[in-house]
Image (tube, grey):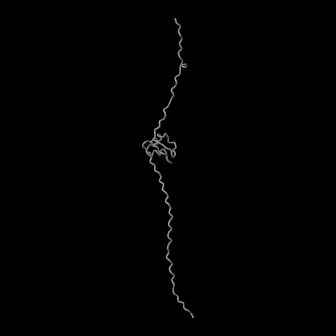
Amino acid sequence: MTAAVPTVAPSPTTAPLAAAAPVTEPAPTYAVCSNWYTVAAGDSWYAIASAASVTADELLALNGGDGAAALYPGDEICLPAGAVVTTTTPTTVAAAATVPATPAAPATTAAPAAPTTTPHTVSASS
């Protein structure tokens, strides 16, 4: 007869642990913008959206904005494809050169009338 060999069942604490798979989130994807707009003084998200005939939500979503983000002159934002912002450039009118006024000719007055003389007869008295 042969002696029985005792067996030991592996316990959860002695079992090798599998390496946990790292949790990765996909990298954000950004649309390539081909339609840039340069912010001018006085612009706002809503004014630009209105001028581009798009909704403010579309414009904000495309630029990752929330409407509270400040815009500064010179900032560049992306407009949806096909959107066009028509801006009016203020026209600067050059100041007209000032030409000195031609002095008015002095008022002409009629030449004084020649003195009229009334002949006087002087008699000699004796």
Classify 86 as above or below 18. below
On the image, the x and y values in percent for residue 113 come to 50, 79
On the image, the x and y values in percent for residue 93 come to 48, 56
Farthest residue to the bottom: give it.
126
On the image, the x and y values in percent for residue 81 come to 43, 42
Left or right: where does residue 87 sit relative to residue 123?
A: left
On the image, the x and y values in percent for residue 122 come to 54, 90
Q: In which quarter of the image is the C terminus?
A: bottom right
Classify 67 as above or below 23. below
- Between 123 and 102, which is closer to the camera in this rendering? 102
- Between 103 and 123, which is closer to the camera in this rendering? 103
Classify 61 as above or below 113. above
Number of marks in picture: 0
Classify 108 as above or below 27. below
Farthest residue to the left: give it.
82
Farthest residue to the right: give it.
126
